[in-house]
Amino acid sequence: MTKSVKYTTANGRVAAPASKSVAQRAVVAALLARGTSVLRNLTLCSDTQAALGVAQALGAQVRQQEGSLLITSNFFANSAERLSLFCGESGLLTRMITPVAALLPQPVEVSGHGSLATRPIGMVEAPLRDLGATVATTGGLLPLRVQGRLRGGTASIDGSLSSQLLTGLLMALPLALHPSTLHVHSLKSRPYVDLTVALLKAFGVSVAHDERYEVFRIGGQQRYAPCSYSVEGDWSGASCLLVAGAIAGRVTVENLSLASPQADREMLTALKRAGAQVCIEACGGNGNGSSDGGSSNGNGGDVRSAVTVSQSPLSAFTFDATDCPDLFPALAVLASCCDGVSVVKGASRLTHKESNRALALQKEFGALGVAIALRGDEMLITGGSITGGSVHSHGDHRMAMALATAALRASGEVTIEQAESVEKSYPGFWRDLDRLGEGSAR
């Protein structure tokens, strides 16, 4: 699909989509809870739908009721001789579900498509073998085959590439026969681990770690408790909307939690450093009560906020995105509209995303007249004028959203190829941009 965006202003109020990162974790937790869990405030993007498909393949029943999803599961009752799990194009789901599948005695094949076929998965092999499972990847890539049962024990994990395998182990090992100790080296994206730990607590499971996040201790033979869980808004998806306000008008994004452990909440820090006007208003609680005999998810005091960002003169900024690499596309847009050269650290985290985002940003923003240089782990973006032109999303949802946002300040029309890639995380993005841009996005 091709999408064209012309120069316009961005004004209005929209709600952030639900976080696919939280939603996928919640779906897997509900799969592991014996009974019925209620998941509310989901956005059925392609990654969340893939997680629901995997849950169903593992025996869970999924049904809709009054805007919520009810997931009924008895995970260990699955009697199929062999199982096949299709993860779509979700790296998180792949690395999270593989340790979970290793809890089962039967062989399980895990596969995906698109860019997932080239994203490394070999890091699962050694830890899972140390913890009692057998696993074989295809030269470090998908498809892979895994068979348990995962017994627990001690394993070492390299966290420098991603925290997603650690998330999968933290979700699976509470159901192992024995306690486990994980030694984690060079962990990146600590906030995503905090997100996992908080969600586990909501489902009645506990894990412990030291202050440096280097040693994790997980008790075995725990039980997940079904609960009613409301998925919070997505700071990743909101990032481009907030930048749209900073560069082209005044935008209010609702359904965001300032207390969220999501790493991408740091977008507010970058906006303030650049000189954007940021205003926050509380919108009331979005608590979660118990349902179907289960527990509540423990964030009944959570307050969702509306964040308003208004256009003002912007100056170059420095920002470390090592723990929030998904912000790079939105940060590139922001920096493109700043006076001077902005420096964003953490570019080495971008190689194995839906695209090689560092090179993709350099190429596509270059096509719009924006100079982006890569210097080791740093990305240097020179602000100035943005031209019109034809660009490509590289099949990457965050690239498509960033290029569309940059187009708000372009001197001519910007045409984006593979614009449908936004379905991965934010299927309503074009509708919301159209609303903010007063009908300019077509």
Image: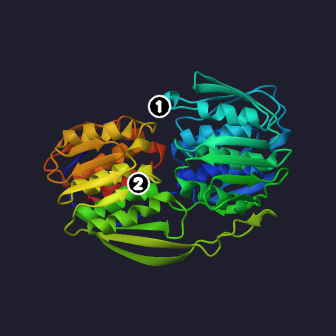
In the picture shown, does residue 363 fall above or below 234? above
Of residues 320 and 35, which is closer to you in this image?
320
Q: Is residue 329 rendered to the left or right of residue 152?
A: left
In percent of the image, x 29 and y 54: which residue is there?
343
- Residue 10 visible in the picture: no
Q: CA distance from mark 2 to mark 1?
A: 23 Å
Dot label at residue 309: none
Residue 359: x, y in percent? 32, 36
- Residue 391 visible in the picture: yes
Local crowd size for mark 1, using a 10 Å CA cut-off: few (<14), some (14–19), many (≥20): some
SS of the residue under disc 2: loop
State the image quarter where residue 103 is shown. Answer: top right
Q: How many marks?
A: 2
Q: Name the amino acid, label 1.
A: Ser
Residue 347: x, y in percent? 38, 45
In percent of the image, x 34 and y 40: which residue is there?
358
Residue 9: x, y in percent? 22, 61
Q: Name the amino acid, label 2.
A: Ala
In percent of the image, x 59 and y 53: which residue is there?
23
Of residues 66 and 297, which is closer to you in this image?
297
In the picture shown, does residue 236 fall above or below 250? above
Q: Which residue is mark 2?
A: 321
Local crowd size for mark 2, using a 10 Å CA cut-off: few (<14), some (14–19), many (≥20): many
In percent of the image, x 26 and y 60: which residue is there?
438
Q: Which residue is mark 1?
A: 115
